[in-house]
Structure formats: C-alpha cells, structure tokens
Amino acid sequence: MASRAVCRVESAVIRWCLPAVACAVVAMNTGPSIAGGAPLLRDVIDVGGRPYLRTVIRPLLSAAGDDDRSVYVRDGVCAYIAFAGHAPVQDDALLLRHFGPDMQPLHDDALVAVDPPNVYSAARGSGGTYVVWMPTAGYWQVMLSGIDVTGSPIIDPPATVAVMPEGFQAGYTSVAVGESGTFVAFGIRNVEGNTRQELHGRWLALNGGFLTPQFPVSTLAPHMSEGVYDSHVLGSGNALVLGSQGTRTWDSMRAWVKLLSPTGSVIRTVDLDSLPSEGGAILQRSGGLSVVYMRITSGYQRVATILRKLDFELNTVGPDVELPLQTGFWTSAPDGRIALAGVPNGALDIRVRLFDADGNAVSDWIDPAGPALAPPRKSQWGLTTQGVAYDADGTVWVAFESTEGGIRSYLSQLRPLPPGDLDGDGRLTNFDIDPFVLALTNREAYQAAFPHIPPEAIDILGDMNGDGVLTNFDIDPFVEALVNGP
Ligand SMILES: [Ca+2]
Ligand SMILES: [Ca+2]
C-alpha cells in the first residue's frame, strides 16, 4: 500500500514537472539554519487549525541588560529594539538588531548611545530610521538616529532636536514617523499654575528641521488633563492621533481620535465613547484604520476593549467589536488582521492570540515560548513598547523576557507553514516531495531527517484533506497543491 502511494505521488509529480525540467534533483532539505547560534526551540504547532513553525532565539549578543523591548516588521525583516540598562544609569542607549524571514541575524548588535540618557520611547520610521523621544530638563526633545538592515548608522552622529520649549511635561506623549521622511511629535504643557493643560503638536523633517511651528491640538478647560496614547502618519500626509481627556479622575476620562493636516490644523475630532474610556492603539487596516480603546471604571479597571474601524476621514465602518482582551499589545498586518500579545486573565505567562480584520478570534491563546523556557515568561508593560509585530504574510514576531537564569530577552517567531510543507521551510516546493513520501511511509526515518519538527506535527503538516491525519488520502490533494498552489 505504502509503496503504491509513493509511486502515485512521485509519478504524478514527475508527470507535472518533466516538461519544465524543474525537479531533476529532489534534495532533502533540513530547513533553514540560524546563523550565530542554534535556536532554543524550533517546532511546529497548530494555530487555528494551521501549522505554524515556532522558533525562539536570544536576539542580542551583548551581555548588557535590556528592557522595553519592541519589534517592528516589514517585508519579512524584523527590527528588534530595546533600551539598554547600564547601572547606575538606565536607558542610556538603544540596542538594535535586524532579522531576516528565517530569523537569521542581518548584523550584530548595534548600540546607539542616547545623550542625555533618558529614553522615553522610540518610533520606527521608513528605511530603518528611529526617532528617540525623551524628556530633558524642562522640555521635550528628540534624538534622530537609527541603523539600516546592515547595522550601519543612518544619521551619524545622532542629531538631537528640541521639539517643544520649556514647560512641556513628561506624560502620555507620542511621536509618529511617516513614510515620506516626516514625523509628528506631541507634548503636554501645564499652564496657569498647573490648573490647566494644553496639548501641542509639531511636524518635523527627519533631519530635525521644523516643518511647522507648534500647533494646539486641544486646549482644555481648567482642571482637565489629557494624554496621547498613539499616533500614526497616513500616506496622505495627514496624521491620526489617539488620546483621552478628563478632569483628572478616571471616571471623567473619554477617549478621542483626531485627524490633523500637515500644517497642524485639526481636520476632525471624533469622541469614541460616552462612557469612561482611555486610548489604546491605532492599527493598520486595508482601506482605513482601526482604533482600539478601553472602557474603564472609576477605580481604573479595564472593563472592555473596543475595536472601531474607521476610514481615512474618521467615518465609522461597520459595527464596533468588543475584543475579549484585558490588556496587552496589539499590532496589525497591512490587511487588518490583528495579533495580540499579553498575559491573559488569571495567567502568569505571555500568550499570543490572532484575530481577523473584523476582530473575530481565529486562534486560541498560543504560547510563543513553548517548552524552551520555564514560566513565567512576561511581555513588557507600558505605553512605549510594541512587543508584537504582524507581517503581511501572517508571520508574528514576539519580544518577551524570562527570569530563568536572570532576566533575559527572547524573540519568538510564529510563521505559518503551508500544508504539505514537510521540510518546514515556509514554502511548498518540490523539496517537500521526498519529506512527504518519507513521512507517509516511515515516520521514524522522517523524524531522524527533520529533528526540528516534532512527531505530533507530522499530521498537522501532512494533512492535506482536513481530516487531521496524514494518510494516503492526502496524496492527491498534496499533488494538487504542488501543481496548482494551496
Ligand atoms: Ca517546504
Ligand atoms: Ca488527511
């Protein structure tokens, strides 16, 4: 039976590829290797009914402590950014490293010194440029720096620009970098004996030049306070900013979103809720954006997480969705699919969950660390970090820490594998024919040839007809997928 199966699949494939002379040599591929150290874990898991390759590495070579880890991903390249912690001065440098689609490091650690040493947040721009946002004595300034994917400095030496004059406060403040080499910064100033606050913004070029004067985003009534939670520069050159304001009590806070022009005028303000609420995050969506905000209680408990879909003029698209989330970090793929990383209620450990663009969960909670590290493994909390990134191809990158052997940072990749990808390299190709046949006919030999793929993953990867196991009934769909695509 088995040998007949082999003949069927191989003859079918040979019939298909002989005219193209494409598969004269079918080599065994043991999967991508990771330069600079073996991964701590590489296995295949079921994510919402699909096989995903889960890989865990240590992202940094340096022994320096790091915190506030963020990941940003685009076109398969992941940028890992952390604030270096060098006692007694914390956050005096940024550590940056880029990784390719197979998690191969593209360069060694790059260390960008931050002077003065007080990193508040970092925003990633196009082309690997980073804007570091930091409060200094009495005013806000930014440091313009960054490295490209080879590890070379982009702005060398880093340029420091005072964005807001004296009197601006640390607080919930934000900076967003656009694709066209501009960025917008926001700062809060206390006025009239600290009885009133003003929120201001300013557009700048990436060389530090001012494109606008400071402009008021909102002027609050006395005893009102405000915070900016996230901002985003649109392709049109407009900016979206998400915040909330109230009378310095949680039950008075209301979340809002504003659309700003490149000259700083407020084009439109939308109040997101009539109930106590605070801002969350702005997510990408095909043809628009989504905002995530939280309903809160007067004692500051988050009671609901709301996803609102907007077009680029801030018109609501479709009904709101209440996400089953308490807290964590959100990110979106360009088509709007959402990935969340955080610690679920009642748990100690970081988990990841995936949602479609309408906010429906498409997976259970996924453990990004697996058995590689003992619990607890934590995400980073705070407004200034982005611990999860979602690429267009569905790959999810997660930055987290573990206290095993001291607090150390880790980087996990969850990469969807197409069904039939029995060599686990992320693509269904002719190189999967021999592994498919081997898994079908001799599982022990398959496990010896592909030790990074756990035995229980064979049926996840090899099941082509949806019955949950790899059998001869999967041969025809395998050939069909190889010939015509999945
Ligand atoms: Ca493959
Ligand atoms: Ca099957």
Image: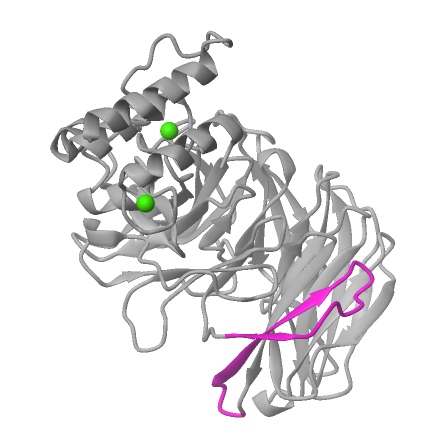
When asked about the image quadrant of residue 135, the answer is bottom right
In the visual, does 104 lie left or right of 74? left
In the visual, does 107 lie left or right of 305? left
Q: Residue at x 31, y 25 (%)?
A: 35
Instruction: Tell me: residue 401, above or below residue 156.
Output: below
What colouring does the structure picture have?
Answer: one colour
Verify whether residue 306 appears in magenta. yes
Q: Residue at x 41, y 26 (%)?
A: 107
Quadrant of the picture in which ligand 2 is shown: top left
Of residue 38 and residue 53, the one placed in the foreground of this image is 53
Image spot of residue 483 (x, y percent): 49, 26
In the visual, does 114 lie left or right of 59? right
When asked about the image quadrant of residue 99, the answer is top left
Image spot of residue 196 (x, y percent): 72, 82
Instruction: Tell me: residue 284, above or below residue 294.
Output: above
Of residue 289 and residue 385, the one placed in the foreground of this image is 289
Of residue 483 and residue 214, the one placed in the foreground of this image is 483
Visible residue check, residue 110: yes
In the visual, does 113 lie left or right of 372? right
Visible residue check, residue 54: no
Of residue 234 and residue 367, the one placed in the foreground of this image is 367
| Residue stretch in magenta | 298-323
When asked about the image quadrant of residue 317, the answer is bottom right
Q: How many labels were placed on the picture?
A: 0
Image spot of residue 28 (x, y percent): 27, 19
Q: Residue at x 74, y 60 (%)?
A: 240
Image spot of residue 122 (x, y percent): 55, 50
Instruction: Tell me: residue 174, above or below residue 460.
Output: below
Instruction: Tell me: residue 67, above or below residue 425.
Output: below
Quarter of the figure with the N terminus: top left
